[in-house]
Image: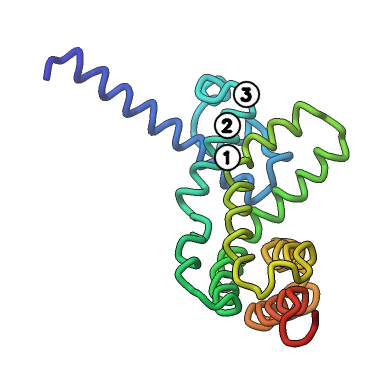
Amino acid sequence: MKRGKYNLKKRAERQEETRLRIARATLELHEILGPALTTRSAIAERAGVTRPTVYSHFPDELSLGKACSSLELSDNPLPDPGRWEEIADPEERMRAALGELYTYFRRREGLWANILRDQEMTLDAGDPEARETDAEIMGPIFAHWERMGETLAAGWGSAEAHPRLRLGAIGLALDFQTWRAMTRTQGLSDEQAIELMVGMVRCTAGVAGTA
């Protein structure tokens, strides 16, 4: 390899390493402080770079947020609903799914609590640009959650038996705040929370004489 090409390659590698270091520092601060309290100065200090370097790699909140979200999904992937589709019985499918999801929630609780808290702050502030940025960053995650709900909605008796209630119950079962209320506020174990949610969906689906 010619020296010029070698130098370009090494420079590109260093740039990518710096970019990754900045994204990881941002993710760590989001888990500690939350997105709203994470400043560019704090990111630069944690990443060991200058503030202008942070801006040169990520000129706006959208580019930084997308890099941070992508890193989080790579390091801590969401449960894969494709595996759940192999379970024919809807109750067993939901137990397996919620077992994976609630384990994930417990592992990433600090990050999710901060993100959702700060999203509420954004809504209260009435900043449409900030809302659009949040929506674009979280878009892939919202799409994944929708697929999880669709996967768990199949097979619960008659399609005409309380469909809106059933979908609402499944949505609650998949919701981080629901899990937190059950386990942190009410003191349930994950296993107890799973059985409570399965029972709720069973009732709204019109199974076992509850239609």
Residue beneath label 1, please?
Answer: 26
Tag count in the figure? 3
As shown in the figure, which amino acid type bears the numbered disc 2?
Answer: Leu
The residue located at (56%, 64%) in the rendering is 104
Is mark 3 in CB contact (under 8 Å) with mark 1? no
- Percent position (x, y) of residue 209? 77, 87
Q: Secondary structure at mark 2?
A: helix
Residue beneath label 3, please?
Answer: 60
**First reached walking from the N terminus: tag 2 or tag 1:** 1
Work out whether 210 lies above or below 64.
below
The residue located at (73%, 39%) in the rendering is 36
Of residues 144 and 150, the one drawn nearer to the viewer in this rendering: 150
Q: Secondary structure at mark 3?
A: loop
Work out whether 4 lies above or below 24.
above
Q: Secondary structure at mark 1?
A: helix
Is mark 2 in CB contact (under 8 Å) with mark 1? yes
Of residues 16 and 138, the one drawn nearer to the viewer in this rendering: 138
Direction from residue 110 to residue 47 in the image, left or right:
left
Residue beneath label 2, please?
Answer: 64
As shown in the figure, which amino acid type bears the numbered disc 3?
Answer: Asp
As shown in the figure, which amino acid type bears the numbered disc 1?
Answer: Thr
The residue located at (56%, 69%) in the rendering is 97
